[in-house]
């Protein structure tokens, strides 16, 4: 894919680490997991605008 941003060209190549026939089983894991896992930390945070530096790092629990 080639995009042009103003006068600066940008070439982007995105590859997936799994073969296409396994994508249906794996792709759901690439979506909202981090955001969903952050919900308890956001709810426990003090009122007001918070940035990612105000919250603990969200790390997946892989079982």
Image: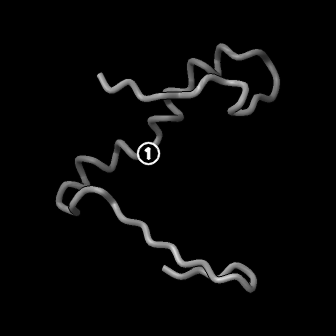
The residue at the far right in this view is 48
Judging from the image, what secondary structure is the residue with disc 1 in? loop
Residue 62 vertical placement versus 8 (above, below) = above
Q: Is residue 52 left or right of residue 23?
A: right
Query: Furthest-left residue in view?
Result: 21
Quarter of the rendering containing residue 57 = top right
In-image side of 6 versus 58 (left or right): right
Q: Residues within 10 Å of mark 1 (few under 14, many from 20)?
A: few
Image height of 41 relative to 24, above or below = above
Q: Residue at x 76, y 15 (%)?
A: 46
Number of numbered discs on residues:
1
In front here: 39 or 5? 5
Where is residue 25? Give x, y as percent: 23, 47
Quarter occupied by the C terminus: top left
Quarter of the figure with residue 51: top right
Image point (49%, 35%), residue name: 34
As drawn, 23 above or below 36: below
User: Is residue 26 toward the left or the right of residue 60 in the image?
Assistant: left
Decide: is 19 above or below 43.
below
- Across and down, in percent, residue 39 comes to 56, 24
Where is mark 1, residue-wise? 31
Q: Residue at x 44, y 45 (%)?
A: 31
């Amino acid at each position: 894919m080639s995009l042009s941003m103003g006068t600066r060209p940008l070439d982007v190549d995105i590859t997936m680490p799994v073969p296409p026939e396994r994508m249906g089983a794996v792709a759901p894991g690439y979506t909202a997991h981090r955001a969903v896992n952050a919900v308890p930390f956001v709810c426990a945070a003090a009122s007001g605008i918070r940035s990612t530096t105000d919250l603990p790092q969200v790390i997946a629990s892989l079982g």
